[in-house]
């Protein structure tokens, strides 16, 4: 896995956390650099269930939403060498987190709150002024903070990083862990 050899990871890279930028664009950038697939849990739920995870919870209840999440995360755990965007909510569930960590490296993005809010305002403009939209963003931020509070997770502070630098740090993290796995 030197600079001359292509990087062909075996384990997945899961990106979680909330830094006020698009995780989808980030995972796509990382996957394209490596030449691998990328998956977004929230997008997969919308494609399969035709509603968001929140709407799924409200319509069918928590038990159904949890069953859908567990099934989809079990599928994701079977992937090899993929980049996966995942919100904190499923990773807060110990069973789901352990299943995914058996085949993946997890990198949690973090950022200072004022910078997250600035980025969200810049990215979403007038939508950010809607109290319901802002409340939804704050809910996600709280969940991500709870994930970080679990401790013993790799966290990348993106406060001073632009999206390209974040992607390069994530890629370096992935390469480092894959190399360490091969040396064992």
Image (cartoon, rainbow, N blue to C red):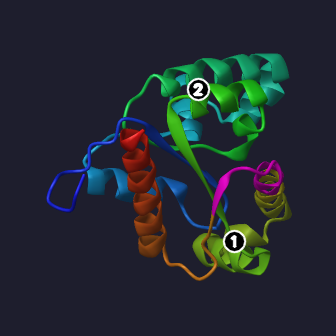
Chain part drawn in magenta: 144-155
Is 2 or 35 nearer to us in this picture?
2
User: 142 or 78, which is in the foreground?
Assistant: 78
Observer able to see residue 2: yes
> Looking at the image, which residue is at 77% across and 49% down?
147
Magenta region includes residue 112: no
Residue 30's label in the rendered image is: none
Quarter of the image with the C terminus is: top left
In magenta stretch: residue 145: yes
- The disc, 2 or 1, on the residue closer to the chain's N-terminal end is 2
Q: Which of the 4 image quarters holds residue 131? A: bottom right
> How many numbered discs, if any?
2
Q: Residues within 10 Å of mark 1 (few under 14, many from 20)?
A: many
Q: Residue at x 73, y 69 (%)?
A: 128
Cα separation, mark 2 vs mark 1, equals 26 Å
Query: What is the secondary structure assignment of the residue under circle 2?
Result: helix
Q: Residues within 10 Å of mark 2 (few under 14, many from 20)?
A: some
Q: Position of residue 14 (x, y in %)?
A: 53, 44
Residue 73 circle label: 2
Residue 49 can be seen in this image: no
Q: Position of residue 178 (x, y in %)?
A: 40, 46
Q: Which label number is shown at residue 111?
A: 1
> Residue 113 falls in which quadrant of the image?
bottom right
Q: In what element is the residue under mark 1? A: loop
Q: Residue at x 40, y 67 (%)?
A: 168
Is 11 placed left or right of 135 in the picture?
left
- For this view, does 19 lie left or right of residue 184? right
């Amino acid at each position: 896995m030197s600079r001359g050899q292509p990087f062909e990871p075996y384990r997945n890279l899961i990106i979680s956390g909330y830094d006020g930028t698009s995780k989808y664009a980030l995972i796509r950038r990382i996957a394209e650099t490596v030449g691998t697939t990328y998956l977004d849990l929230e997008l997969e739920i919308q494609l399969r269930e035709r509603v968001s995870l929140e709407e799924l919870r409200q319509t069918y209840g928590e038990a159904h939403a949890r069953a859908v999440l567990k099934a989809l995360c079990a599928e994701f755990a079977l992937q090899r060498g993929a980049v996966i965007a995942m919100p904190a909510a499923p990773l807060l569930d110990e069973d789901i987190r352990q299943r995914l960590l058996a085949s993946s490296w997890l990198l949690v993005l973090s950022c200072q709150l004022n910078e997250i809010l600035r980025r969200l305002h810049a990215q979403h403009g007038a939508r950010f002024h809607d109290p319901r939209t802002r409340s939804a963003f704050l809910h996600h931020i709280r969940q991500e903070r709870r994930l970080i509070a679990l401790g013993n997770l790799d966290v990348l502070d993106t406060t001073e990083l632009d999206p390209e630098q974040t992607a390069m740090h994530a890629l370096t993290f992935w390469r480092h862990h894959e190399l360490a796995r091969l040396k064992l």
